[in-house]
Image (cartoon, grey):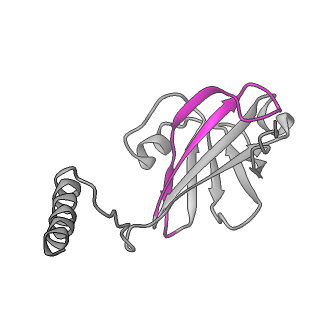
């Protein structure tokens, strides 16, 4: 009987060593790591954007916000045809500048000085719509409304 108890203890100890050696351990998630949230937006009115349909993806991780504009293939879905350079977010102004030109710039200021077209938004992600100004050099700014885009649920099979 005593031998059986020793075998059980020995087996448990060996199992623990095997699990430790194989790297099986409990993973912990840092409570301080901010969640990454991506929202997608879509401008449904091609007349607002000169005939093209645009989508916007905004990624937020804590206080850091990045955004990218896409020209979409059609009105249905979020099928990307052209990807534009990333935009810049100014947290003090709560302003997002997204280039409409394919020429990337090192900084927001460099892009604005280049007199290339861009979209400018007051960014409040809790809303269901973003109303931006389309800035085309030599033209008056025009409004462009982006609605929050939720992909359709996958069809049950």
Residue name at image x 48 percent, y 29 percent: 103
Residue name at image x 65 percent, y 44 percent: 56
For residue 43, above or below residue 66: above
Quadrant for the C terminus in the image: top right
Residue 17 is inside the magenta segment? no
Q: As rendered, which of 116 and 132 lies closer to the eye?
A: 132
From the viewer's perspective, tell me whether residue 81 is left or right of residue 30: right
Residue 135: x, y in percent? 66, 43
Marks counted in the figure total 0
From the viewer's perspective, tell me whether residue 3 is left or right of residue 64: left
Residue 59: x, y in percent? 53, 53
Residue 140: x, y in percent? 74, 44
Quarter location, residue 68: top right
Residue 109: x, y in percent? 43, 48
Quarter location, residue 115: top right
Residue name at image x 82 percent, y 33 percent: 76
Residue name at image x 79 percent, y 27 percent: 74
Residue 81 is inside the magenta segment? yes
Furthest toward the front, the residue is 1
Q: As rendered, which of 85 and 105 lies closer to the eye?
A: 85
Q: Give the overall secondary structure of the magenta segment.
A: strand
In the rendered structure, which segment of residues is drawn in magenta? 64-92
Quadrant for the N terminus in the image: bottom left
Quarter location, residue 9: bottom left
Q: As rendered, which of 119 and 25 lies closer to the eye?
A: 25
């Amino acid at each position: 009987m005593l031998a059986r108890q020793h075998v059980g203890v020995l087996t448990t100890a060996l199992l623990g060593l095997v699990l430790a050696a194989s790297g099986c351990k409990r993973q912990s998630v840092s409570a301080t790591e901010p969640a990454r949230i991506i929202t997608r937006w879509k401008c449904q009115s091609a007349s607002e954007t000169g005939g093209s349909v645009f989508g916007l993806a905004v990624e937020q991780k804590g206080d850091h916000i990045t955004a990218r504009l896409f020209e979409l293939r059609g009105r249905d879905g979020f099928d990307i045809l052209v990807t534009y350079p990333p935009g810049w977010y100014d947290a003090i102004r709560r302003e997002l500048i997204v280039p409409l030109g394919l020429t990337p710039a090192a900084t927001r200021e460099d892009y604005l000085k280049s007199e290339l077209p861009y979209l400018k938004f007051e960014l409040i992600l809790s809303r269901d719509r973003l109303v931006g100004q389309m800035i085309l050099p030599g033209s008056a700014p025009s409004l462009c409304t982006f609605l929050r885009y939720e992909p359709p649920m996958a069809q049950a099979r």
